Image: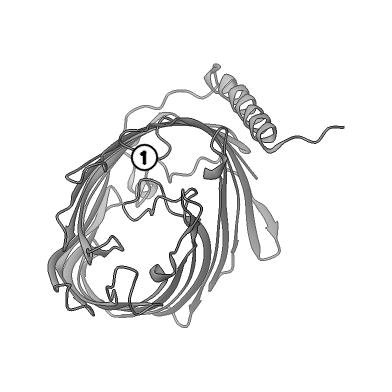
Amino acid sequence: MKALTKREWNTGFGLVAAIATGLSIGVAIAPAPVQAQEEEVLPPEERRGTTVLRRQHPEVDPLGIRLGGFMMFPRVEFEEQYDDNIFADEEAEIDDLITVVRPGMALFSNWGNHQLRLDYNSEIGRYASNDAEDYEDHNVLLFTELDITREIQLQASGSFALGHEQRGSPDDVGGEEPTGTQTYSGKIGYQQRITRYTVRVEASKAEKRFDNVPAAGGVDIINTDRDRSEEAINLRVGRRFTPEYEIFFSTGFSRERYKERVDQEGFQRDAEVVSGAGGVNFDFSGVTFGEISAGVQQSEYADPAFESVLAPWINAAVTTNVTRLTTVKGFLRTAVRPTTIADASSFSDYSVGGSVDHELRRNAILSTNISFNRSDYDGIDRVDNQLTYGLKLKYMMNRNAHVNVGYNYVERLSNVNGSDYRQNVFSVNLRVHF
């Protein structure tokens, strides 16, 4: 029997995924014995902290596999995408079909005390006509929490991720294939409640590595000068005045240390950041809840060519269950983030957006989201404005199969020539889980 070529395998695999998903959609749009829900406010015992997407659906939720004192939830997703601008390019817009497979698994303890959790997520993408863009991403996370007493908890986590830079990222070096990344990270935390006070301390460290990639002329683009370690320590002290809200203060210190003292442009990119903020955490009967904080962030850089940056720091996220069937979320964030773009030390990032999730039927949810992001770079004259919009329909067929149909739109407007782009992505997804 003749062996399939890679192109034939990709195309055949895509057809199988599309046919399987298409059959599922046929079942999804057929009449179902699930009646439309009535608009009503949830009673307090059902609604606290529960949103439309996170609400339990016992008739269609996976049961999992019991393994002694653990529960395992294996899953796999098959998705077919159409992307009309795979390189996020302003002029040469190239479209393609992408077949994506996402195997994954969650394993967690169901003990009375303490907690242990293992998560594995992966995403394998195959392009029908541009196989140099093919990718395989993997992520493993191990988390544990020890209940020392009812008031004291210790947490620790470690993760390893293989990923790739998105073509729309300003830091993308424009190689013949996406830049591969490796990230090793660990975190430890301590939390203690003392009457109405809560004290939380966290320390983390991450190592990031970037692969060299081939360029158009046959030489490699060297990315080793982007390799770095990131360390951070954060302290948060809060006081709960009523069951509905808590006032807190937080402060943190972080630093970046690059593997190479000087990058290819001649800059020293080591940096240190100090931040402080105050805020409020609130939960009004689980109907409206969230957290709002504001403060300042001071960034200092090793290279004398980079000026220090003092900027506001805001992190606000609010969720409200308008009715039993509708959840509305909103967020506002500002921060200074690092970059490896030539001549720039960092950029001030401003993001605002929201989402609406509405339960059409007990087993069908319609979701939409929109966000606006502004990136103002320090050290160079560059400002990027980006609009993102998404729409998704989720149909939960039964305990073992869910179908998602989605659309995403991204538009970036920049004052740098050649950096604008528009991108439309349509997707059909079949998720199988146990």
Q: In this view, does 44 lie to the left or right of 146?
A: left
Count the numbered circles shown: 1
Q: Which residue is drawn at 16% across and 45% down?
A: 415
Q: Where is residue 228 in the image (x, y as percent from the top left)?
A: 40, 73
Q: In which quarter of the image is residue 370?
A: top left
Residue closest to the eye, 221 or 149: 221
Above or below, 50 relative to 191: above
Q: Could you tell me which secondary element the residue under label 1 belongs to?
A: loop
Q: Residue at x 65, y 45 (%)?
A: 434
Above or below, 36 relative to 2: above
Mark 1 is on which residue type? Ala
Residue under label 1, please give it.
Answer: 88
Q: Which residue is drawn at 41% across and 30% down?
A: 84
Residue closest to the eye, 429 or 145: 429
Report whether residue 358 is seen. Answer: no
The N terminus sits in image quarter? top right
Q: In this view, does 116 lie to the left or right of 381?
A: right
